[in-house]
Structure formats: C-alpha cells, structure tokens
Image (tube, rainbow, N blue to C red):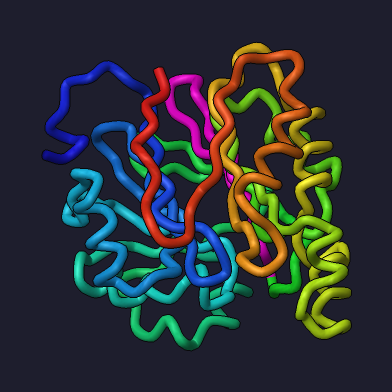
Amino acid sequence: MTLESKQSPYNLAVCTLASGSKGNATYISDGQTSILVDAGLSGVEIERRLSARGLAPESLDAIIVSHEHADHIKGAGILSRRYNLPVYISQKTAQASPQLGRLHEIRSFECGRTFNIHRLSVRPFSISHDAEDPAGFTVGQNGVTIGIATDLGVATAMVKEHLKRCALLILEANHDPKMLATGPYPWPLKQRIKSRSGHLSNQDSKELLDHLQHEHLQYVILAHLSENNNTPQKAFDEVVKALTHCNARLSVADQYTSGPVIYLK
C-alpha cells in the first residue's frame, strides 16, 4: 500500500531511509506529491527501503539534491532515469556532480528562493560545508513545515531563521568531541570535521535545538551520526537535554535501516 492510497488525514509524512556517511535519503509526502531529499544509496537499495515501509518508488515525483558528495547523490541519476523524475539541484552543485550521469530533467534552484513541487513548498538555504553550494531545506504544506539541516559545520543565524517554527526537524549530530579527539582519524580529517565547513557535534546540535524548540515542535530526528566518532546513545543523551520547553519526540536516524513513517497533522 502506498501513502497515496491511504485516507489518513495528515499534512506531511516523513521517513528517513538512511542517514550517515554511507548514504542519505529522506522521503517526504503530502499524500499526493512524494519527493526524496537526497538519494545517496544505490537505486536498488532506495527502492528496497521504500518498499520495506510500504512506500512505492513509482509514486515519487522528484528528487532534491543538497550537495554533490557521493553519500547524497549516488542513486539520484538512476532513479531519475528509471522513473522519469526531475532532479532539483543548484547550478553549482550540478556542475560539481558529473557522476550523476544523464538525468531525466534538471530543474535548477537558488538558495533563498522558494520553489514548489505541486503542493509542496520548498525553501533551500545556504549552509556551511565543504561543497560547492550546499543547502539545507524546509518543506511545507498547509502550514506544517519540516526542516532539514545536515552536513554543516556551524549553525549560522540564517540556518536558525529558516528552521524556526518547524513541526519536525532533522538535525545533524555527527560526532562526540571526545571520541573524535581520541579516535583513529588522521589529524587533518579531525580538523576538517571540527571546522566551520565540517559537521555539527552532539553539543552543537543540542545548542541549535535549544534555540529552535517551541511548543508546537513535534519531532526531532538526529542525523548523519559518525560510526567511528559517535554512538546513538551519546547523541540522544546529549541532545535531549535541550528539550526543556516542549514535548517533542527525539529519535536517531540509522544508516542501515529506514526509520518509521512519521505523520504530521
């Protein structure tokens, strides 16, 4: 059964298909229009994870690409060709992504300018990461908004402005600083991860959530955890401290299995 065949009254449905350095993909639907934000697994694996949650890949209407790193675009080309999907991507990111191959259709966006995919309103915003033109996104419909901010080294004032008042947030909690400092990575890589163009730590994510929480926030999903420099328990235990003024449910996205479908009303 697909979401499109369900009669449940909801505004948006969200499912994190994968999150981490081996691949990232998030499914979002309003029941009529369904999109992927990033497609960083193989096409076959994305199809498998959609099917595991009762979601039909044939129901997809578009793919949005945040930046050109392989863990965000690996399956975008094949899915675009197989299902005749337009790929929404910035011009700089497209130029930096020859590995995408031929796409069914390219639709360019610019950070700061809202665009629509049928009834879904998508607003991309610039983030700080070591890519050509990296973007975070808010996706909204009927007054309900989802915010996605992963792969960023610092939560700027712009990031905070775009993510406020979301009903659901997908936030990066990449590493535990102590694990990173004592872990196996070479020093230059550790410096890159800690830099303003790297990744948010658990503490950074907690501080960001502390700023963003509000009484109507329903869900927070921690994303892009490092397998070597973090654990789901460490990320959860640190970030949950921020939830002092709302009753949002906190969870941690997984690299190897898709999460549950979350329905927002």
**Side (left or right) of 177 relative to 163:** right
Q: Nearer the viewer, residue 91 or 27?
A: 27
Q: Main secondary structure of the magenta part?
A: strand
> Where is the C terminus found, in terms of image quarters?
top left
* Residue 241 can be seen, yes or no: yes
Q: Quadrant of residue 92?
A: bottom right
Q: Residue at x 43, y 51 (%)?
A: 26
**Percent position (x, y) of residue 6?**
16, 27
> Where is the N terminus found, in terms of image quarters?
top left
Depicted 121 relative to depicted 224: above or below = above
Q: Is residue 226 magenta?
A: no
Depicted 144 relative to depicted 204: above or below = above
**Percent position (x, y) of residue 69?**
58, 75
**Percent position (x, y) of residue 109?**
55, 58
**Side (left or right) of 87 relative to 232:** left
Q: Nearer the viewer, residue 186 or 156?
A: 186
**Percent position (x, y) of residue 123?**
58, 43
* Residue 124 can be seen, yes or no: no
Q: Is residue 142 magenta?
A: yes
Q: Nearer the viewer, residue 104 or 34?
A: 34
Depicted 234 relative to depicted 129: above or below = above
Q: How many marks?
A: 0
Q: Which residues are magenta?
A: 133-148
Q: Residue at x 72, y 65 (%)?
A: 229
**Side (left or right) of 31 relative to 201:** left
Q: Quadrant of residue 203?
A: top right
Q: Nearer the viewer, residue 178 or 167?
A: 178
Q: Residue at x 83, y 37 (%)?
A: 207
Q: Residue at x 77, y 80 (%)?
A: 185
